[in-house]
Amino acid sequence: MHRRHQLVLHTISQLTDCLRRYETIYRGVPGFTEQVEIFRRLATEAETQAERCLDGSPDLPTNLREIRETLIQTVCAVSGPLAGWAAIIGDESLRGQFSSTPQELRAMGAGLGDHARAIAAIGRCTLGQGAGHYGLTEIALERLHQETLRFEETLERCPEAFHSLRSAAEELHVFLRDVMDPLVRGFLLSAPGFCAAYRHARKTKNNGLNNRTSAPALRTETMLHA
């Protein structure tokens, strides 16, 4: 199998695993029935894309476009629960069931904000280089960015949060750090003219990228340039 097809297959596997985790997290939670269906559908689509890759499909650009669309939908699907979590945390009637400390919440909110800003920075940088057709759409990136900031602001005002809510937020943190960040970088690094912009972005202060390159991201970059 071609090295880039291996990369596509690997990233689809990561995406599918994460979507299945989200489906499990939200199953049975009041008000999130639609969200569960969205995650289930996206996971099924990702698995279909993986099967095509295993069949030896030589059409890598088509594979990338299909995965890009799944990624865009995933970003939008993940951003929705952030607003829901913020509403739950802000509900005074539920205050007695909270367990996390203010410090933990602030750290969690800051982490979510950092990674959302990093992904948004990658998107803006790429669009500026004329290679936006390889990346996530600016609308999806901005929606994730704004919803995350709103969640972070709510956390600052709330002393505690549900233990299960905290666990779900930690899952999102892991998703953004270990899956979305290297995945987006991986696809964008294959776009013409992006490599120089990517290196510049990593050197730019406060763009959320410097000193945050994870091991999966480095592996992705190595595979693409092998």
Image (cartoon, rainbow, N blue to C red):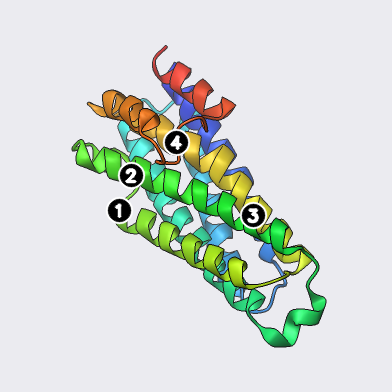
Residue indicated by mark 1: 138
Compared across the picture, whether 91 is left or right of 137 comes to right
Which residue is at a point 75% across and 69% down the rendered structure image?
A: 162
Which one is earlier in the sequence, the residue at label 1 or at label 3? 3
Density class for disc 1 (Cα within 10 Å; few <14, some 14-19, many ≥20) is some
Quarter in which the C terminus is drawn: top left
Mark linked to residue 209: 4
Examine the image and state in which quarter residue 144 appears.
Answer: bottom left
Q: Secondary structure at mark 2?
A: helix
Image location of residue 199, percent across then percent down: 34, 25
Residue assigned mark 2:
123
Q: Is residue 98 found left or right of 119 in the rendered image?
A: right
* Res. 10 image quadrant: top right
Real-space Cα separation, disc 4 to disc 3, in angstroms = 18 Å
Work out whether 207 lies above or below 222. Answer: below
Asked which secondary structure carries label 3, the reply is helix
Q: Position of residue 224 (x, y in %)?
A: 41, 20
**Which numbered tag is attached to residue 108?**
3
| Crowding at mark 2 (Cα within 10 Å: few <14, some 14-19, many 20+) | many
Label 2 with label 1: CB-CB less than 8 Å: yes
Of circles 1 and 3, which is in front? 3
**Whether residue 22 is visible:** no
Q: Earlier in the sequence, mark 2 or mark 3?
A: 3
Residue 119: mark in rendering: none
On the rendered structure, is 139 left or right of 16? left
